[in-house]
């Protein structure tokens, strides 16, 4: 169960970074980048350093509570370690973005475009490695009306989704190193490959299972 406690350690480190950097940060900080990777929203210093640790803490507290009310909660025991590994991957990605935003706000030459794309790509690759282990549930995984209605559709969709997430993640990482004008389109292709293909596939498998199509 050691993996269960990695996320809170990372969240504490994010909070410590925020406290240490606070006196040196500007009053206005970037909190959002648009599709062209330009800052399109600025927020207060508090929002800049507290948003990502707050989201990470919320996930760590909320997801274990949500699984207790999941109608399929009996399935969690079969993939307990994977549940915490997935949560750790998400929290670690947020920690990377927190460090990058703080450094950028302090005036360091941080290539935010590459950091954002590479972080998203690594997130997809990490999730793809563990998706096939996720058992049917209502909170984690590729949740479509068709995967939630059939355990077989769930298994086949997540088996394919594991591969498409990894491939899509690698494409998204590659987008960090292509010319800037092409980067959003390459990243979009990677994200669609990773997430959209399994959604369509879940419907196809469900149709086959229900006898509605070849």
Image (cartoon, rainbow, N blue to C red):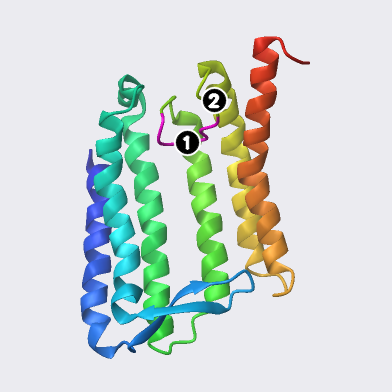
Mark 1 and mark 2: Cα distance apart in space = 10 Å
- The residue segment tinted magenta is 138-144
- The answer to whether residue 165 is above or below residue 53 is above
For the N terminus, the image quarter is top left
Image position of 58 (left or right of 185): left
- The answer to whether residue 4 is above or below residue 28 is above
- Residue 150 inside the magenta-drawn segment: no
What residue occupies the far top of the structure in this picture? 211
User: Which residue has dot 2 on it?
Assistant: 147
Sequence-first tag of 1 and 2:
1
Image position of 154 (left or right of 106): right
User: Which residue has dot 1 on it?
Assistant: 141
Q: Residue at x 31, y 24 (%)?
A: 73
x then y, percent, for residue 7? 28, 52
Foreground pick, 149 / 20 = 149
For the C terminus, the image quarter is top right
How busy is the neighbourhood of tag 2: few (under 14 within 10 Å), some, or many (20 plus)? many
x then y, percent, for residue 139? 40, 35
Q: Do residues under tags 1 and 2 come within 8 Å of each other at their CB atoms?
A: yes
- The answer to whether residue 70 is above or below residue 111 is above
């Amino acid at each position: 169960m050691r993996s269960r406690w990695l996320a809170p350690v990372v969240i504490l480190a994010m909070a410590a970074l925020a406290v240490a950097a606070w006196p040196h940060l500007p009053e206005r900080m970037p909190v959002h980048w648009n599709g062209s990777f330009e800052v399109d929203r600025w927020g207060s210093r508090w929002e800049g350093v507290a948003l990502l640790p707050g989201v990470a803490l919320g996930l760590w507290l909320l997801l274990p509570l949500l699984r207790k009310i999941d109608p399929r909660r009996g399935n969690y025991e079969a993939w307990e370690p994977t549940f915490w590994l997935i949560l750790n991957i998400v929290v670690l990605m947020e920690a990377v973005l927190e460090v990058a935003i703080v450094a950028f706000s302090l005036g360091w030459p941080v290539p935010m475009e590459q950091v954002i794309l590479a972080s998203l790509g690594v997130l997809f690759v990490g999730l793809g490695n563990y998706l096939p282990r996720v058992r049917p549930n209502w909170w984690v995984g590729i949740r479509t009306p068709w995967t939630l209605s059939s355990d077989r559709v769930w298994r086949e969709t997540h088996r394919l989704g594991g591969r498409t997430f990894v491939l899509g993640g690698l494409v998204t990482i590659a987008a960090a190193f292509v010319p800037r004008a092409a980067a959003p389109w390459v990243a979009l292709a990677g994200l669609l490959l990773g997430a959209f293909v399994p959604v369509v596939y879940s419907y196809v498998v469900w149709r086959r299972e229900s006898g509605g199509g070849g």
